[in-house]
Image (spheres, rainbow, N blue to C red):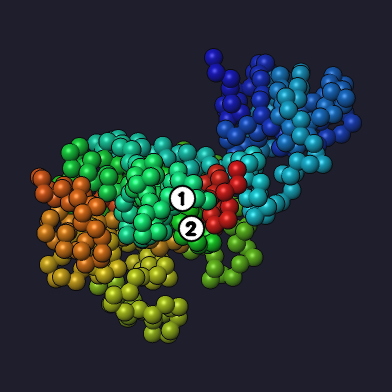
């Protein structure tokens, strides 16, 4: 039988039965007669208290029981004499499996800054905050797979190494086996990629969308869920060089089907987390409230964490066009009082402050914007009859702005080819993508959701580096 976790022990009826506790010491306190050892194994935000009678187990036997040490405790599960938990363990045996020198172990039981803990990312899963964050991340990931399976989507694996740039962004990581000190050159003095492993320039992928489209135009409904990479030299709280993307694509879906899917999707996942991570969310909400006490009111979250999540689940998303949104922003008080940092006019790429105004102040519910100017959107989006806009859609959330970006894809071969030529994308290199419009093309749609941005929204963490175990950012590839 599997060894019981602390989460299971804390919900077991205490009948003085003998149990085994395995975990890491969070804290130790006590007197000359009794020692109280707080143990956690990562299965729950809650610790279990081990009570040691020093008349039965000597101080000498406990000399290595310090914060960070791993222990095995054999004892009786009894009703707790203290507040905060229903049960505790009266120790009969305490074995230190792995000691932790209290002079050197960095995560002592005191308040540490997130920056300090980030520098010790190899140990931060042992802290209450990051244990909660990574358990939530697990449940988000599980719910994503569960949702798409129930919706009849097939999980496909798009390539991580690719020769295409799905977004036309250019900020990509090069993949090569060439000798960087002495690369082979062509007669023109350029690097000769014919000598490279793939015999052409290749990069780490920025998106699995284009490959997902190919699979959808045969399997019907598919989704990718994998790592993507952007070589943007951006040191902000919102950017990572390596992150995970969820990208569904569905044949015979128009823009309205796509919006419906996106709304069902985020509500399903958040509802799952609210149901299965209640204790972790309650802890993270309290952490956020404590953290924001020192901030100006204007810089605080618009609502408490759990209320914010219920806000998304309980409200039907407002749907309007980009043009209608611009008109609302132009008539808004912040615009008339020059309170927006970025100016508002038709054709701009909306900033987070504009998106948050629409969600938090005007509609007071999540918003889906559609029909953006084609000049600020990707080449593959379906062109509207007005010649100016495309059938794009962005889902906007409180506190963050855009959380999902997607569109109906252009299924018309001639229009797609013409648009690729307009923006300088090689139609020869992308022949395989155009082929899907030559052979049995159909209307189809999809969207992308960054897992880390979503987990950041759900947990209330202010820095995206704190919702992925080992963040990759400019100048940082530690661990």
Which of the two discs, 1 and 2, labels the residue nearer the N terminus?
1
Q: Quadrant of the N terminus?
A: top right
Name which residue lies at 10% across and 45% down: 439
Q: Disc 1 and disc 2: Cα gap in Å?
A: 32 Å
Nearest to the observer: residue 438 or residue 385 = 438
Residue identified by numbered label 2: 239
| Residue positioned 26% across, 64% down in the render | 424
In the picture of the structure, the residue carrying the numbered disc 1 is 183
Helix, strand or loop at mark 1: loop
From the viewer's side, name the closer residue of 13 and 427: 427
The answer to whether residue 394 is seen in the rendering is yes
Extreme residue toward the bottom, this view: 337
Residue at the far front: name it. Answer: 187
Q: Residues within 10 Å of mark 1 (few under 14, many from 20)?
A: some
Position of residue 418 relative to residue 476, above or below, is below
Label 2: which secondary element: loop
Give left or right: position of 116 versus 386.
right
Q: Is residue 340 left or right of residue 469?
A: left
Q: Give the residue furthest to the right.
A: 32
Q: Is residue 17 left or right of residue 31?
A: left
Quadrant housing the C terminus: top right
Residue at position x 40%, y 59% in the image = 189
Q: Position of residue 156 (x, y in %)?
A: 30, 37
Q: Position of residue 186 (x, y in %)?
A: 37, 54
Mark 1 or mark 2: which is in front?
1
Percent coordinates x, y for residue 227 in the rendering: 42, 44
């Amino acid at each position: 039988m599997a060894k019981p976790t602390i989460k299971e022990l804390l919900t077991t009826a205490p009948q003085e039965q003998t149990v085994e506790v395995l975990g890491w010491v969070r804290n130790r306190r006590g007197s000359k007669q009794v020692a109280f050892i707080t143990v956690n194994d990562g299965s729950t935000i809650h610790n279990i208290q081990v009570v040691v009678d020093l008349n039965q187990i000597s101080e000498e036997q406990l000399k290595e029981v310090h914060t960070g040490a791993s222990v095995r405790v054999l004892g009786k599960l009894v009703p707790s004499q203290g507040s905060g938990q229903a049960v505790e363990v009266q120790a009969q045996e305490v074995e230190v499996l792995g000691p932790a020198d209290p002079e050197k172990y960095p995560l002592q039981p005191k308040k540490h800054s997130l920056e300090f803990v980030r520098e010790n990312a190899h140990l931060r899963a042992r802290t209450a905050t990051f244990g909660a964050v990574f358990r939530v991340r697990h449940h988000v990931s599980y719910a994503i797979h569960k949702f798409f399976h129930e919706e009849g989507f097939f999980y496909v694996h798009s390539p991580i190494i690719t020769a295409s740039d799905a977004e036309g962004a250019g900020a990509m990581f090069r993949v090569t086996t060439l000798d960087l000190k002495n690369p082979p050159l062509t007669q023109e003095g350029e690097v000769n990629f014919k000598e490279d492993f793939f015999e052409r320039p290749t990069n780490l992928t920025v998106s699995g969308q284009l490959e997902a489209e190919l699979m959808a135009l045969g399997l019907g409904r598919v989704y990718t869920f994998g790592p993507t990479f952007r070589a943007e030299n951006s040191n902000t709280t919102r950017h990572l060089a390596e992150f995970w993307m969820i990208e569904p694509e569905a044949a015979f879906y128009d823009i309205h089907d796509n919006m419906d899917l996106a709304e069902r999707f985020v509500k399903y996942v958040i509802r799952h987390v609210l149901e299965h991570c209640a204790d972790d969310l309650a802890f993270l909400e309290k952490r956020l409230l404590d953290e924001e006490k020192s901030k100006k009111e204007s810089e605080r979250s618009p609502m408490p964490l759990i209320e914010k999540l219920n806000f998304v689940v309980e409200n039907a998303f407002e749907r309007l066009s980009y043009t209608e949104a611009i008109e609302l922003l132009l008539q808004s008080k912040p615009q008339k009082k020059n309170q927006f940092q970025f100016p508002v006019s038709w054709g701009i790429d909306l900033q987070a402050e504009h998106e948050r105004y629409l969600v938090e102040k005007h509609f007071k519910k999540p918003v889906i914007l559609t029909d953006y100017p084609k000049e600020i959107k990707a080449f593959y989006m379906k062109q509207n009859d007005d010649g100016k806009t495309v059938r794009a859609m962005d889902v906007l959330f409180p506190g963050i702005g855009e959380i999902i970006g997607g569109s109906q894809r252009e299924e018309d071969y001639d229009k797609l080819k013409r648009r690729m030529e307009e923006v300088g994308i090689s139609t020869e290199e992308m022949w395989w993508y155009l082929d899907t419009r030559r052979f049995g093309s159909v209307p189809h749609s999809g969207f992308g959701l960054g897992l880390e941005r979503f987990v950041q929204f759900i947990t209330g963490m202010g820095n995206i580096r704190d919702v992925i175990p080992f963040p990759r950012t400019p100048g940082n590839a530690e661990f």
